[in-house]
């Protein structure tokens, strides 16, 4: 047994394999210690996340360098073996390779960052992690109304960025245009109705206007895009049943539903204060004429 152990220890590859295993164990322990210290001493979530990712990436890179140095004398043989097997490996791991390429594209191509709200395929959510193979989203919507979290965590392969469009809600312009419509009865004070919608929007989202304008000017410097109006505006169209007012405004992409709720409550309050000069409409049906009917009553 002792001679067998000496023989194994004299084998260079066995020794290198043991040192490699020791290096992996040490790397994992050091990464865990570093991440635990980061969680303990860094309070800001964004900074903490980036520090944890940096510690993990640096640890694994150092391990790779260590292994390469350990097997430096045998790299020629390893390269020949990998060259022979490369075709089979590429075919068997093509999705993994494309996902790794997707991770590189996401990291350096400004597709999205952690914290952005995106739509990948049919899934809308906030990016909570970008791994080597998969991007993790906290899902929004689905069976939940508005833009609230559904509670599901969705894992999407990074290769997806090469296959379909990526919708980013917050990358360069962290606002969305939203609209709400209000039906007003014929005969109401139309000018006052318009004033109610505009003033309500200004009171709720007016603070966004200057900030959104600054972001839009930045967009104009970087992209070939037309200037757009970011302050609240109202358009009117007459339908068969009422006068329809449409209020358009910019809103923070994470507060679309709550902002709409606040604007609607303010509008309804101010409509009630008009004491009937502005009246909201509902679907009504007018019977213009009845066809002639012959009714025979038999006793």
Image: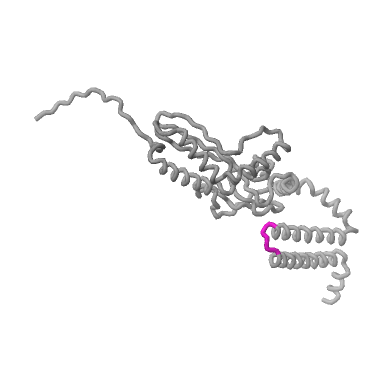
In the image, what residue occupies the spot 30% across and 28% down? 287
Is 260 magenta? The answer is: no
Front residue of this view, candidates 138 and 72:
138
In the image, what residue occupies the spot 81% across and 67% down? 18
Residue 92 shows in this picture: no
**Which residue lies most toward the left here?**
299
Give the left or right position of residue 237, taking residue 135 as reference.
Answer: left
**Which residue lies most toward the right here?**
73
Residue 91 in picture, x, y percent from top left: 73, 45
In the image, what residue occupies the spot 11% across and 28% down? 298
Front residue of this view, candidates 239 and 4:
239
Report the colour scheme: one colour
Front residue of this view, candidates 259 and 93:
259
Check the image and report above or below for 286 versus 259: above
Residue 9 in picture, x, y percent from top left: 86, 70
Q: What is the quadrant of the C terminus in the image?
A: top left
How would you classify the magenta stretch by its main secondary structure? loop
Is 44 magenta? The answer is: yes
Residue 83 shows in this picture: yes
Res. 285 image quadrant = top left
In the image, what residue occupies the spot 73% across and 59% down? 51
The residue stretch that appears in magenta: 42-46
Res. 168 image quadrant = top right
Give the left or right position of residue 111, taking residue 237 as reference.
Answer: right
The image shows a total of numbered marks equal to 0
Front residue of this view, candidates 262 and 126:
262
């Amino acid at each position: 047994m002792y001679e067998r152990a000496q023989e194994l220890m004299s084998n260079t590859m066995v020794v290198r394999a043991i040192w490699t295993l020791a290096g992996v164990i040490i790397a994992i322990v050091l990464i865990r210690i570093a991440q635990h210290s980061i969680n303990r001493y860094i309070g800001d979530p964004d900074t903490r996340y980036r520090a944890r990712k940096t510690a993990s990436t640096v640890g694994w890179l150092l391990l790779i360098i260590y292994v390469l140095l350990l097997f430096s004398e045998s790299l020629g043989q390893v390269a020949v073996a990998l060259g022979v097997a490369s075709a089979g490996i590429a075919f068997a791991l093509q999705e993994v390779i494309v996902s790794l390429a997707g991770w590189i594209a996401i990291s350096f191509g400004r597709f999205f960052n952690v914290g952005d709200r995106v739509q990948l395929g049919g899934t809308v959510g906030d990016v909570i992690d970008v791994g080597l193979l998969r991007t993790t989203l906290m899902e929004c919507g689905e069976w939940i109304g508005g833009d609230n979290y559904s509670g599901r965590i969705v894992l999407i392969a990074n290769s997806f960025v090469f296959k379909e469009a990526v919708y980013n809600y917050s990358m360069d312009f962290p606002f969305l245009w939203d609209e709400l419509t209000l039906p007003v009865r014929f005969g109401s004070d139309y000018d006052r109705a318009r004033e109610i919608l505009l003033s309500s929007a200004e009171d709720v989202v007016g603070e966004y206007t200057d900030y959104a304008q600054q972001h839009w000017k930045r967009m104009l410097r970087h992209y070939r895009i037309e200037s757009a109006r970011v302050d609240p505006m109202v358009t009117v169209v007459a339908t068969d049943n009422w006068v329809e007012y449409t209020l358009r405004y910019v809103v923070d992409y994470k507060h679309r539903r709550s902002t709409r709720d606040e604007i609607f409550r303010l509008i309804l309050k101010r409509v009630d204060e008009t004491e009937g000069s502005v009246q909201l409409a509902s679907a009504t049906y007018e019977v213009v004429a009845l066809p002639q009917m012959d009714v025979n009553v038999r006793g």
